[in-house]
Image: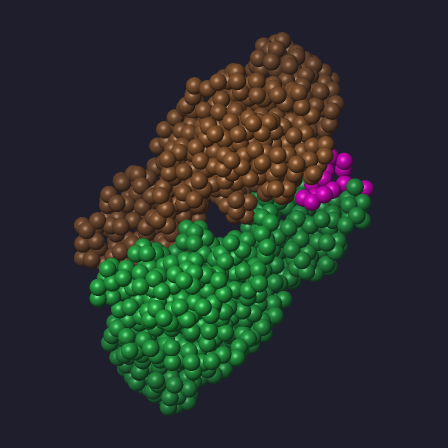
Chain colours: A brown, B green
Amino acid sequence: MGDLSELFAPKRIAVVGATEREGAIGRAIMDNLIDEFDGEVVPVNPKYDELFGLQCYGDVGETDADLAVIVVPPKVVLPAMEAAGEAGITDAVVITAGFGETGSEGAAREKELREIADEFDMNVVGPNSLGIMNTDVGMNATFGPEMALDGNMSFMSQSGAFITAVIDWANDEDIGFKDIVSLGNKAVLDEADFIEAWNDDPDTEVIIGYLEGISAGRDFIDSARDVTQDTPIVLVKSGKTDAGAQAASSHTGTIAGSDAAYEAGLDQAGVIRADSVQHLFDAARVLGDQPLPENKDVAVITNAGGPGVMTTDAIGESDLEMANFTDSTLENFSETLPPEGNIYNPVDIVGDADNERFKTALDVALADDNVGSAIVLTAPTAVLDYDQLAEDTVELQHKHDKPVAACFMGGERVKPAADRMQEAGIPNYFDPSRAVDGLQALADYADIKRREYDSPTEFDVDRERAREILETVEERDDTRLGVEAMDLLDAYGIETPQGDIVDDPADALEVAEEIEGNVVMKIVSPDILHKSDIGGVKVGVSDEDVYDAYEDLITRARNYQPDANILGVQVQEMVDLDDGVETIVGMNRDPQFGPLMMFGLGGIFVEILEDTTFRVAPVSESEADEMTREIDAAPLLRGARGREPVDTSGITETIQRLSQLVTDFPAILELDINPLVALPDGVQAVDVRLTVDPDEL
Amino acid sequence: MGDLSELFAPKRIAVVGATEREGAIGRAIMDNLIDEFDGEVVPVNPKYDELFGLQCYGDVGETDADLAVIVVPPKVVLPAMEAAGEAGITDAVVITAGFGETGSEGAAREKELREIADEFDMNVVGPNSLGIMNTDVGMNATFGPEMALDGNMSFMSQSGAFITAVIDWANDEDIGFKDIVSLGNKAVLDEADFIEAWNDDPDTEVIIGYLEGISAGRDFIDSARDVTQDTPIVLVKSGKTDAGAQAASSHTGTIAGSDAAYEAGLDQAGVIRADSVQHLFDAARVLGDQPLPENKDVAVITNAGGPGVMTTDAIGESDLEMANFTDSTLENFSETLPPEGNIYNPVDIVGDADNERFKTALDVALADDNVGSAIVLTAPTAVLDYDQLAEDTVELQHKHDKPVAACFMGGERVKPAADRMQEAGIPNYFDPSRAVDGLQALADYADIKRREYDSPTEFDVDRERAREILETVEERDDTRLGVEAMDLLDAYGIETPQGDIVDDPADALEVAEEIEGNVVMKIVSPDILHKSDIGGVKVGVSDEDVYDAYEDLITRARNYQPDANILGVQVQEMVDLDDGVETIVGMNRDPQFGPLMMFGLGGIFVEILEDTTFRVAPVSESEADEMTREIDAAPLLRGARGREPVDTSGITETIQRLSQLVTDFPAILELDINPLVALPDGVQAVDVRLTVDPDEL
């Protein structure tokens, strides 16, 4: 994708489909542009010689514009695009709807649009877009009713309606933006292009967005990882719940990926995911204006005990901590604060505190090295001048260069003070929990900036052997593979118990004799799913019993289903479960993000407690390691309740090797190692199931 | 407690400690009362004959007032109270601080205050209170800076500062109150008294509060259960987190109960617990003004697809559901809505929707029997008149008598419409998730009103035998009892495995012979906590091995600790764990709520996953049954993963019988049955530990 800086800061804009007709979209866009745009606006409409007192062109190719905004009916969009492309106009915004969102004819038209964009190397927003804005050059190339205020956030949205709603609200709240883009159908430019462009834009301090889907999940992760090292991204990704995903799918006409994939992918990308509109803006406002905290420890300075307790609760429920002050801070407080106050955090400077006492206490707290950020919390009193307190808060925030959140609880009485602080980037909230949310966003982003992304390890594997095993599905009716694919794991260096599949009792005995101790024997048939139910599994078989066990297994299978396709009998080393923990490592393929790795403990932990964790593959060593740490039952792996710890590095390596396998072979649609038994001295993949798409081989 | 209606609506108020001195609290209260109070205000101060142009009395006893507001210094509060009491003044508000919150002298003074109140049967608010308000009679008997607006919420707060903050904010938001009380130290009147009084007040539609502690937990539950059948209660109870609890304790000087107890107790009381100030008011506003929904199914009518998806997500994350429309509704929508819209929920009536289309769609949706409530959701468009939409929304809400929440997304543009709706009790939010929170509060309260509280079952038990067993601690150095207390469970009809504790190998054999099959033998000693670690437990002992096993257990115990107090050896029937599930039923005593029952599955479920549930005892059958259903691992009890279901009614009965035991004997400080093994055909309490306070016996 080309440079997008001209898209947002053109000098001459052609409006293709401009008109003076009241109520027309082409009219609304012309009005919006003529109103404030610093550059030139050129109407294009073959029906007129002049519009709005400006020379009107018949063809966009004659306009010498650097941006074409296209609002003509669907059928004439493509010729207009071609004319623009041929004239060297490399940026276009297609407002017109009636493309991919409307069925097969529209989808075909969208495909052609993409081809034209490719041919002329054009940056195209839309189609089906509300348009774009840039407050720096006063460009409102949308048909929305209002222009945004100037600010340092850039905003993308997959819903045009949400943009109009946000601007109306934000103007009222004095919240401004740098660029705004309505993404529309994302036929050419998508979210990844805009985050990259905004990362290069010195006027964009924070990127926010509302998305219903992400076009190319893995690419987005890779771009966003780079971007979020410099510029924070906060997104609402809707379709979090099943009902929401269905609504999003019906709204955009695309199949949404699973929310587990989005949750994992956005986290891997370093994106902060907001769970509501309020959270989106609460987080974005502080990220745009405040420094990052050096630790998660918060000081609360208040003149009101009760609200101090509420704030402490809100901090307790966040990932932040109440700061423990140094001795010298405590000494200072005990000398300067009245005896009925509280020198420990939350610092209660008591209801009769004047501005001087507030300022001094905040200054001392912010100077404490144990304090990463502070909340200034007040209830209205007769002795406090809020305007002065706002000035002092802003001054001390600058002096110490630590984040400060304000909670001047009140209405009219605190409004001018709140406005003053907001100007300086310190938003004020009535509810302490929202002030805490803001500080939490800063701490989260500080963590993201400290991340060091390691590349996925490339293990030395036998890819050819794996391919051969996968290709066996082409000879079968069934695209599923079971234990007969244990060699697939082996080819990728994943530990499996010693053993083999045999189709003869003598071979069974031979395999069993090679294995030390008793063996497990299982019938192998794609037609028999629940082997245990028909007695198709024998545990602890000694060498002398192998022969009979083989015959018995075959008989049971035949009795159960005479025409079953019996591939043989698996003879396998017994894995001692007493010292081990059963885990599951799995993968399914997400439509947006591709291979999604899953890890959890076996049995009830996954099935009933849903104690699982996900990552988009390929995963690095540190990501695989995190997976083994972040499930609720993780302490079980590390020796809880007097057990011996199991080999978690073996689990980590298995996750990575499986990640490499499923990344190498898109033909593997689903795969579960269940159980992967983790023992004190290693891991063993005891059983595997997978589904293969032969067309992808 | 007497009737509180006169407290909030007196005719003549004596202000004891009135003064004209600027900055004095007695001055602030006089100013506030003279300003607006409908009745008479009488200053009391022996130094003056006249204050504020009013006759000033030397003694409150001469005033003929019906409410005394006391602001004199701590040392003269009690004489003033006595004078008031002797003169027959039965209502008093003690503003003065310096009582229980300040140390032992203050605590003694508070105790005397309580005695005076008892003697004269006085209703006393405080001490250490900001005061009280009643908007009906214009009484602002506080020293806060502002009077509240008129409304139908009554509000109690353990923080005076929070009251002043709320009033300042609420006045700005046009939110009104009936009564407000600053609870102060709650020496006499506490939260239970106010909720009962407000339940009798026809002008109070909803009760809200901020509490840092509850004085008498079980009494509060019993009162609140009655109240919440008629009047909703929404509370912020702070000290939710450990840090918050510590801050609350330091603020109020009382030991807070555990939050598990508050969470259980408030739920058992039918109280809706708000988790933030915003949530408190969002819930309270709709509860005061809107009807209750008949089901949890919500219709979303919108002109904006993206916000529709966000709202669907918010509903998906709540306990509400997206409504499924009836066929006739769908038919109507498919005839009346444009083809690019969505007739399914969320109903997208498309960006060009005018007021008529909005009104018709909302009318049709609200008429649908499958719809319990609706959200009207809009983004700004040129064709929509918001004021008209507000009128239509209010009209249709009344017509269908179903709750409606509004989400007119925008700022200035929607302000007059939002004001119009708020007047009619339909709050408007920019963030759809807050509109959903409001509807959720209504659905929660509808559930609470549908509750039928059953009384705890009184089982026929052997209380005397239980007492005798508990009294054995008096002969011991140790207040803990272990398996030697199995008979205690038996006395209360809790199933225990067959067996006994013996101090002789011959007796051991005799017990073992009475038991069918092999037995378990355990050393019994209060000095040996981890029996297994020293080999103090033998499983599967056959009759012939009992003698040797006995000797071996004793030897091991002696070797481990020569001076250990060995009570004997327990010989117990083996409980087959293969078909059973290990559970834990426990109790500890909360400082506010008394005996708190706990239930969870044994081992990692409680210790690592913290999958537990709590109820304040005594528990009823339905409460005990809920406990077995609401832990995450509950499906394991009911036959998940092909297992046979265990006897959950046996668990339920054990919880109830234990609840009766710990209610009967406050001397039992802590008790755990661990494990209570639940089998398909019954339960068995295999082990028990308890701590007893001999002084309570």
Image position, residue B595 (x, y; %): 42, 70
Can you see residue A318?
yes
Toward which corner of the image does residue A378 lie, by quadrant? bottom left
Viewer-nearest residue: A78 or B502: B502
Residue occupying image coordinates x 25% and y 63%? B558
Q: Position of residue A332 (x, y in %)?
A: 19, 53
Q: Residue at x 34, y 62 (%)?
A: B548
Q: Is residue B358 left or right of residue B283?
A: right
Magenta residue check for B189 = no
Residue, x 79% and y 41% (percent of image)? B334
Q: Is residue A222 above or below residue B576?
A: above
Magenta part of the chain: B335-349
Residue B337 part of the magenta-drawn span: yes
**Position of residue B117 measured from the top left corner of the image (x, y, whole percent):** 38, 84
Q: Is residue B572 left or right of residue A508?
A: left
Q: Nearer the viewer, residue A421 or B493?
A: B493
Q: Is residue B640 left or right of residue B263?
A: right
Q: Quadrant of the C terminus of chain A?
A: top right
On the question of residue B135 being in view, the answer is: no
Residue B347 x %, y %: 70, 43
Q: Going 51% across and 38% down the picture, which residue do you hit? A: A541
The main secondary structure of the magenta stretch is loop
Count of numbered badges drawn on the protein: 0
Could you say which is closer to the camera, residue B660 or residue B254? B660
